[in-house]
Image: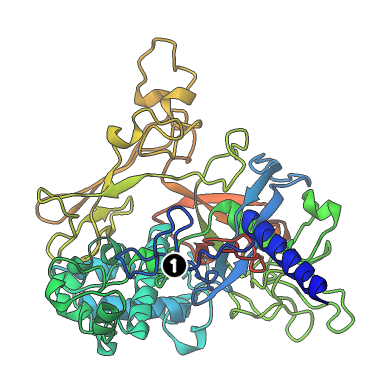
Amino acid sequence: MKNYSLFNLTVIAVCSILMVSCGGGNDYSNTSRGTGWDVTGKNGFELKTNYKDQDAAPGLVFVEGGTFTMGRVKDDPMHDWNNTPNQQHVQSFYIDETEVTNGMYLEMLDWVKRVFPPEDEQYRGIYNGAVPDTLVWRNRLGYNEEMTKNYLRFPSYANYPVVGVSWIQAVEFCNWRTDRVNEKILVDQGYVPKDQLGKATASELFNTETYLNAPTLVYGGNDSITRGGRASERLEKERGKLAERRETDTTGLYVRREDGILLPGAYRLPTEAEWEYAALGLGSLREYNAYRGRKKYPWDGQYTRSGSRKNRGDHLANFKQGDGDYGGIAGWSDDGADITAPIKSYEPNDFGVYDMAGNVSEWVADVYRPIVDDEFNDFNYYRGNVYTKNSIGPDGKVEVVSADSIDYDTLSNGKLIARTIPGEIKQVAVDDEETYLRTNFDRSDNRNFRDGDAQSSKFFGTGDELDPDQRMYDSPQHRVSVDADGNVIREYDQANTRSTLIDNEVRVIKGGSWRDREYWLDPATRRFYPQDMAKDDLGFRCAMSRIGSKSKSSKSPRN
């Protein structure tokens, strides 16, 4: 009996040694894997070792990334040859369950109107630049005046997709949405007083990047707001901070990126590859033909009507049936809409995303080119990178836009739009300090890379000096300016040598709309439109990058 117990102890000891030597018994939940030091914050440094996976932000659904065939392998009746098939890989991301609605956009307009009153001459351009163009509904041979008055604001249309929004306005909505969601997180967590929501002023605005980079400059430098939350004293106690060190060491008073409390990503427009991948909805379809690009619509099958016994013959999307047929015969074979339809009027695809075919076409982030350059990149493909960095002032601190230093741009149609908002960090283009001896990028503006820049021109290396008439994309160059009296001066390019409308200011639009025929319901189809213009059948939805594991079911690494 004695020997048996000794044997057991020996086996246990050997197993313990093996576990430690293989790493199975090491516990790095409170100590550093590299140095063995404490990482709980007791000695100053704190590392989140038990962070849970990223949660979906308001309005978003998870799309697990993967490989897919981007582009068409079907016939090309339009003869554009701008969507030839190529294999791409997309990282996991989140995308809006539905298009951005009139109600969602009105929420932003209400906020902008309260913070930047349009009756104030100083801020008039901000609100006017954010309002959608409701005149897109007008038709020279059609009567749509009631739509111009009511579609955006009347309650009946609150859950309809917003239209008349330019690409630039869609980007600004994404930025606004990011800041409002993060501000609410801080309020809910107690870092900012509850009564701060809804009391913003032009001189005391919250901006996410400003908060993370220079928290004492957020809310216009009114530190009493950020210190007015219930978390300040609690954080001091948890992280061992002393009250007298507040002025010199504020790391215990503000949320840091390392805390994992704020959104790890920002709301943005989806890239073309992300949008097409999400629209195809390959999540539950594992057939070889679908993987290779044979899937035609967001739903299964080759038809636009349901084949299920329960709702056989019902339309699966809102699109134009034929000449003069925008919805079918009343009471029979009707798709339920003549213009746009309310969100969630049709079944979602396998990813749980609604209306990726029909209803409205949608803006995506990419600058348009007739080709997708998969020979250079086949991972998270995107054309449109313009790299910037925070502007640093003479005092060595980031420069924040003030209420009296708002920058406006004059668009090609003469409309003013605010490109900077008070509270944001000023951005400047990256320079040689960032690009010197890099192999992955060598310039700030990469929109023309390999298709429109000097290196991709047939004149490059010939010794001939490039001039505007030798541009690869010889598009019109209209000029709009404002004189000292505020009058808009429009100079139209009247040259008769222009051969294309493609330039760096046109963006890809995806998906069919209520005005389009069945062909455009294929997620692979692509068109382009000027980024500062809008249409009555063009909307958008937001996306957000997935930070961390590829799949929600992925296991966290063992400590």
Callout count: 1
Q: Is residue 175 visible?
A: yes
The type of colouring in the image is rainbow
Q: Position of residue 327 (x, y in %)?
A: 69, 75
Q: Residues within 10 Å of mark 1 (few under 14, many from 20)?
A: some
Q: Which quadrant would the C terminus be assigned to in this image?
A: bottom right
State left or right for residue 516 relative to residue 161. Answer: right
The residue at 39%/76% (across/down) is 181
The residue at 48%/40% (across/down) is 502
Q: Is residue 119 visible?
A: no
Q: Position of residue 364 (x, y in %)?
A: 52, 56
Type of the residue with mark 1? Lys
Q: Which quadrant would the N terminus be assigned to in this image?
A: bottom right
Q: Is residue 4 above or below residue 381?
A: below
State left or right for residue 396 relative to residue 170. Answer: left
Q: Quadrant of residue 241?
A: bottom left
Question: In the current view of this chain or complex, which residue is farthest to the top?
Answer: 463
Q: Position of residue 417 (x, y in %)?
A: 28, 60
Q: Nearer the viewer, residue 359 or 490?
A: 359
Q: Position of residue 509 (x, y in %)?
A: 55, 55
Q: Quadrant of residue 154?
A: bottom left
Q: Nearer the viewer, residue 260 or 358?
A: 260
State left or right for residue 348 relative to residue 219. Answer: right
The residue at 34%/29% (across/down) is 436
Question: In the current view of this chain or complex, which residue is farthest to the front?
Answer: 2
Disc 1 target residue? 48
The residue at 84%/52% (across/down) is 289
Q: Is residue 382 above or below residue 237?
A: above
Find numbered disc 1 in the image and state the secondary structure of the residue it sits on.
loop
Q: Is residue 462 above or below residue 263?
A: above
